[in-house]
Structures are given as structure tokens and as C-alpha cells.
Amino acid sequence: MTPVALTIAGSDSSGGAGIQADLKSFAALGVFGASAITALTAQNTTGVSGIHPVPASFVTAQIDAVFSDLAVGAVKIGMVAQAETIAAIADGLMRWAPRHVVLDPVMVATSGDRLLAAEAVDALKTLLFPLASLITPNLPEAAALLNEPVAESEADVERQGKRLLAMGCRAVLVKGGHGHGADSIDYLIDAERSIALAAPRIATANTHGTGCSLSSAIAAGLAKGDSMETSVRNAKAWITEAIAAADRFAVGHGHGPVHHFHKYY
């Protein structure tokens, strides 16, 4: 069977994040990618200049079209934009019951532009978190979801991870890219344990699409039948290499994209 993953997310017109980054990540890791687009964005490496949400009913139509024909092994959810879209995605997931759902709670773009309506945050937590196998907030997103300051210590990260876990998801990956120190440390937290995953922090401005790509890489591993821990470890190693190779590109005048296909060129 060909492993298949579905991304439900927004489109990035500059190709570095969103649906485009997800499909590149799936392809780079040997997984066939399908998509359901939740919003169109007018954006580039310097910022987001416009967002055009896709009607919720058409998000539903895309999800149903994919699941009715393709053997989806895992779903990645990224930018969901608004509460109506969140409800439509939740209904679709409950209807089709995919085995694995990786939810990246995208709230703010690398450029600092907001990608999730403030009034939709509660819907994200109440409707989608309980359906997720894994949620992947970065440090600022975890803090925003909990209305707390950004975690400054390992103990704070683990405590926030446990609070997010209590919202119904089966595991949490708190990403440490916004932290400090020589290493970027992510924490994989579930009901039984907390695993610290460290990689050298890479000095580059080209990090556009990092979060999208990491969550997609995890979904790709799950679609191939890997365990959650193995999928996260492999995705962490892959995205670290993609960031390290990002400066091979000269794309845009802001935060350039990571190099999804660093193994090939």
C-alpha cells in the first residue's frame, strides 16, 4: 500500500509554509500527499497581506472527496482560520475516523501576522484537541493557549504540556525553537512520560514553514506505520537538516523557506 497523508491547512502563495510546505514534506519523506485547503493567503517571506477563508461547506467537500477514495493513513491539520472551519473539520474527522491526527495549532506566522481569529481559539481547543493524536505548539503558542507566560524552564514546559494534554489530545510536542541556549529542545509529553529531544540550534533567518513542515513530517511517519516516538524523532532529525540547508536557497527578502529536499539537491 502506498502511504497517504492528508493535510488540512491554508495555502501559502510564496510556497514556503502551509499546504505547499506540507506536500513538500510528505513527498520528501516518501508519502503521497492529499490536501483540503481551509484558506488562501496572500503572503511572502516578509509577511501576510491578505487572508481569504474557504467556505466551511467546501472544506467539508474536500475532506469527504479525499477520504471517500484514498486510504488516508494520517491527517495533519494546520491553519484553520475561523470557528466555522474548525467545526467542519471536526465533523469530518468524526465521520471518517482517521487513525492518526497531528494538529499544529497555527496562531501566528513566522512574520508575526495572526493566522487564527481570536474568537476561534476556544473552538480549536474544545473541538479539535480531543480528536488529536498529537498537538505541536511552539513555546509562545503553548503559553497563548493556556493564557500563561512563555515557559522559561523544563519544569514549566512539562507543566504546560500536561495542562494541554488534559484538554483531550493523546500527546503534546512542545517545540523549543523559540527558546534559548545552544540546543533547540522539544518535549514529547503523554500520559506516561516526557521525552526531551535536543538538536543543535542553527543560526539562520530562513525558518519560514518550520512548524508546518515538522508536523507534516510527523504525520508522514505515522502514515508509514511508525510509532509516535519514532515519527517525532525522525521528523526532528529531518527538519534540523532542512533548516541547516536553508541557506543554500536565496528565496525572498524576509524569512526564507527551509530546504525540504536537502537530501536530493
Image (cartoon, rainbow, N blue to C red):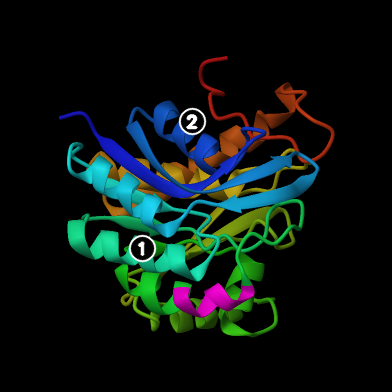
Q: Residue at x 49, y 54 (%)?
A: 78
Label 2: which secondary element: helix
Which residue matches tag 2? Answer: 24
Farthest residue toward the left?
1
Q: Nearer the viewer, residue 161 or 76?
A: 76
* Of the image marks 1 and 2, the number of the one nearer the N terminus: 2
In the rendered image, the quadrant that contains the N terminus is top left
Vertical position of residue 124 compared to residue 244: above or below: below
Vertical position of residue 75 compared to residue 164: above or below: above
In-image side of 88 versus 37 (left or right):
left
Residue 238 location in percent, x, y?
Answer: 50, 37
Image mark for residue 88: 1
In the rendered image, the quadrant that contains the C terminus is top right
Q: Residue at x 18, y 37 (%)?
A: 69
Residue 73 figure quarter: top left
Label 1: which secondary element: helix
Residue 13 location in percent, x, y?
Answer: 64, 35
In-image side of 69 versus 38 (left or right):
left
Badge 2: residue crowd in 10 Å (few <14, some 14–19, many ≥20):
many
Q: Residue at x 60, y 81 (%)?
A: 156
Badge 1: residue crowd in 10 Å (few <14, some 14–19, many ≥20):
some
Farthest residue toward the top?
265
Residue 47 location in percent, x, y?
Answer: 77, 47
Please report the bounds of the magenta region as a residue range: 118-123
Q: Nearer the viewer, residue 192 or 106?
A: 106
Q: Looking at the image, can residue 132 be seen?
A: no
Residue 208 figure quarter: top right
The prevailing secondary structure element of the residues shown in magenta is: helix
